[in-house]
């Protein structure tokens, strides 16, 4: 077994859950319960663009909200940000529930844009709207 086999196995598990959810084999509740502890890749939502400017790299939502992207593979994340024109960003990894909790805390502060989440905006497009964040945390943490 190679050094990175464990990472690939977790990515495969997350991908299987997403496929089952997309194909309606898993309902939203079962998906969230299972996906909550999956490791996902992410970066800060604000960063540098290839044109030299800085911007918020979120997918726009309604009423001053946006969706912060998270990914099940580092390569998918790199592909997305390459298309978006982002440069010089830090790649981080954490359990999905931790990112949801961080967004909840951030949304309770005085921010101009409240953030939901989107899991892989190119392949799966699973969204968690801002009003859903706290109920989802309570549900996953049980």
Image (cartoon, helix red, strand yellow):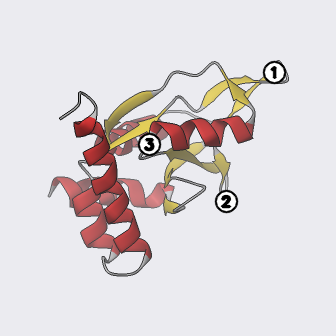
**Is residue 137 at least partly visible in the picture?**
yes
Q: Which residue is mark 3?
A: 73
Q: Which residue is mark 2?
A: 62
Q: Are marks 3 and 2 in contact (CB under 8 Å)?
A: no
> How far is the residue under mark 1 from the one under mark 3?
27 Å
Q: For the N terminus, which image quadrant? A: top left
Q: Say left or right for 141 vs 100.
A: left
**Is residue 57 at least partly visible in the picture?**
no
Q: Secondary structure at mark 1?
A: loop
Image location (x, y in percent) of residue 31: 30, 67
Residue shown at the point (22%, 38%) measured from the top left: 6
Residue shown at the point (37%, 36%) measured from the top left: 102
Q: Which residue is mark 1?
A: 53
> How far is the residue under mark 3 from the one under mark 2?
28 Å
Of tags 3 and 2, the one toward the viewer is 3
Crowd around label 3: few <14 · some 14–19 · many ≥20 (10 Å):
many
Q: Are marks 2 and 1 in contact (CB under 8 Å)?
A: no
Q: Residue furthest bottom?
A: 24
């Amino acid at each position: 077994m190679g050094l990175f086999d464990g990472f690939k196995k977790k990515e495969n598990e997350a991908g299987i859950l997403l496929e089952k959810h997309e194909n309606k084999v898993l309902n939203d509740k079962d998906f969230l319960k299972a996906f909550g502890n999956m490791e996902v890749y992410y970066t800060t939502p604000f960063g540098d663009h290839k044109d030299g400017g800085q911007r918020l790299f979120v997918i726009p939502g309604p009423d001053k909200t946006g969706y912060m992207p998270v990914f099940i593979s580092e390569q998918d994340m790199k592909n997305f940000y390459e298309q978006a024109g982002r440069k010089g960003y830090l790649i981080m990894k954490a359990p999905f529930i931790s990112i949801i909790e961080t967004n909840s805390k951030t949304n309770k502060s005085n921010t101009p844009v409240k953030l939901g989440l989107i899991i892989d905006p190119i392949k799966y497009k699973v969204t968690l709207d801002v009003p859903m964040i706290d109920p989802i945390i309570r549900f996953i943490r049980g």
